[in-house]
Image: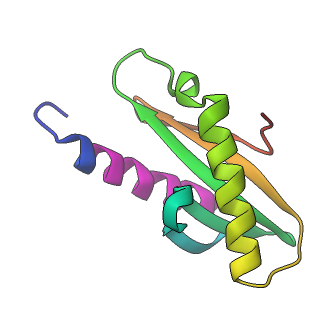
Amino acid sequence: MRGESTRSFGDRNEEAATAFLEARGFRIIERNYYAHKLGEIDIVAHKSGVVHFVEVKSSKGSFNPVYNLTPTKLQRVVRCAQYYLKSKRLSMPYCIDALLVRNGSIELLENITI
């Protein structure tokens, strides 16, 4: 959308990402979980006994948001996920996922690695 702020663009895409996950059987546990100085996790979800820590990346135009998934960003998400599990006293399998939102389409990359 022309003239849309970066924040509202991101919020709108996180809403779309949440709806996308829910339609595929994920139960949303939290959104925008802030782990002190470690950073933030966009979406924490649960499906089939696994906690999914989901990083949402979006872009306008032809740029593929997958290029915003840098090793540094993924390491930060892993540290946040580990902190989340420890702080909630959860001992269960987890994975790091990415949701790419571009031009109205959404792609889920499950269990990505660094």
The residue depicted at 87 percent of the width and 72 percent of the height is 49
The residue depicted at 20 percent of the width and 34 percent of the height is 1
Q: Position of residue 71 (x, y in %)?
A: 67, 30
The residue depicted at 28 percent of the width and 44 percent of the height is 9
Q: Which residues are magenta?
A: 9-23
In the displayed structure image, the side of residue 47 where residue 33 appears, left or right: left
How many numbered callouts? 0
Q: Main secondary structure of the magenta part?
A: helix
Q: Is residue 71 visible?
A: yes
Taking the view exactly as shown, the residue that stands out farthest to the top is: 62
In the displayed structure image, the side of residue 85 where residue 16 appears, left or right: left
The residue depicted at 89 percent of the width and 73 percent of the height is 92
In the displayed structure image, the side of residue 7 where residue 103 appears, left or right: right
Magenta segment includes 77: no
Q: Position of residue 46 (x, y in %)?
A: 73, 70
Q: Quadrant of residue 90?
A: bottom right
Q: Is residue 41 visible?
A: no
Q: Quadrant of residue 102?
A: top left
Front residue (pair 21, 7) = 7
Q: Is residue 57 above or below residue 60?
A: below
Q: Position of residue 110 (x, y in %)?
A: 76, 44
